[in-house]
Amino acid sequence: MVTLDKVFTSQASPNIALIKYWGKRDEKLILPCNSSLSITLSSDTVNTITSIIFSKRLKEDSIFIDGKRQEIHDKETRERLQILEQMREDSGTDARFLAVSKNNFPAASGMASSASGIAALVYSANAALGLGLGARELSIMARQGSGSACRSIFGGLVLWRKGRLADGSDSYAEQLFDEKYWPEITDIIVIVSKGRKKMPSRAGMRQTVETNPLYSVRASSAEARISKASDAYKKRDFNMLAEQIMADSNEFHALAMSTRPPIRYLSGTSFAIMDMIEELNREAGENIAAYTFDAGPNAHIITQQGYQDEILHALGRTCTKDKTEIRIAGVGTCPRMLAGASLIDERKMVPK
Ligand code: PMV
């Protein structure tokens, strides 16, 4: 049952793709050309909190992200918010909503704020609208807001199956191993730039699919890597896992760069970090760390807790000239409802 005039708040974490999604077979439903594999990051380090209220007293729908009111009629925001329209319709109410979202990390900088943002939004809306959707249905819903968001509905190591059906009902994420399976796994996030992405992933993917002849090999190479990487995770074989992670990041960026016109997400600092990790691995005689980069220059260095200090030390030498910020995340859980953390003034129906 729908609960009007009451704020519902949830928290979700971003995820980092170890084997990346890039390219859609259906733009509207957000159906990917290849499956992808990610780990959800721990919410104590990176999270999005989203509050939502539905009320007949509200004159219009509105959404605030990090204190800024979003242009609801802007094409991308409208597309993303279609899921809320659908959820509202399914619940049978026509009440307007106010949603307020806060990230504790820079949004739109290749840090996947859309993943945690959309995951928290569908989580809170599901509760407010009393839809009672289960994790799989929430994942399908989140996918239609932003592809990678479907993976943030689960904790641990998560697989997003690309699916085959035209209606997208078999394209959802599922947990392969929970957050406790390999607790030593650590992501050292090096925020090289807090700026917005040069090329948003939606447009970048479309450009790649349309212009890049190399794209035809991507689907099969990603599927093969997913099976090797999940097998390595199962065996807790870091050396093998790291090999797959770095190969996939490199393939993704080679693909972006060979798109017309070329898409370059990496900066000089990103390449310096790659050199540094390769050097550390060479010295160790095996992979002790792996780099991976999404659609931006920020590095995610995946390692095991025991190597954290050594890597931080090496980073200190590599990034001295840059104003980099470092966050360290472990493997995180699925989203959760938060009591008493509302971002909305319930009485006045405005952001706090
Ligand atoms: O779901 P989107 O539109 O944020 O695209 C995600 C694309 C990558 O981050 C580069 C890869 C991935 O699988 O997360």
Image (cartoon, rainbow, N blue to C red):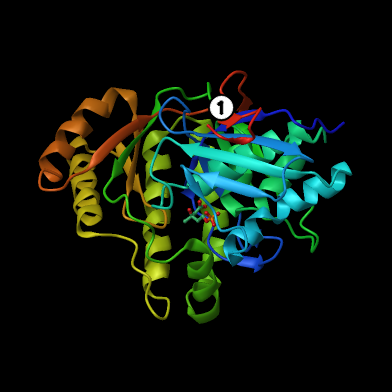
Can residue 149 be seen at all in this image of the molecule? yes
Residue 20 versus residue 145: which sits nearer the camera? Answer: 145
Q: Residue at x 18, y 52 (%)?
A: 272
Q: Residue at x 63, y 37 (%)?
A: 153
Can residue 161 be seen at all in this image of the molecule? no
Q: Secondary structure at mark 1?
A: loop
- Number of marks drawn: 1
Q: Which quadrant of the figure contains the N terminus?
A: top right
Q: Which of the 4 image quarters holds residue 9?
A: top right
What percent of the width, then of the height, locates residue 75? 60, 66
Residue 320 versus residue 99: which sits nearer the camera? Answer: 99
Q: Which of the 4 image quarters holds residue 78?
A: bottom right
Residue 89 versus residue 288: which sits nearer the camera? Answer: 89
Picture layout, residue 346 above or below residue 90? above
Circle 1 Cα neighbour tier, 10 Å, few/some/many (<14 / 14–19 / ≥20): many
Write down the residue under mark 1.
333
Picture layout, residue 87 above or below residue 349? below
Residue 282 versus residue 122: which sits nearer the camera? Answer: 122
Q: Residue at x 46, y 29 (%)?
A: 236
Residue 320 horizontal side relative to residue 173, left or right: left
Question: Residue type at mark 1?
Answer: Thr
What percent of the width, then of the height, locates residue 194? 32, 49
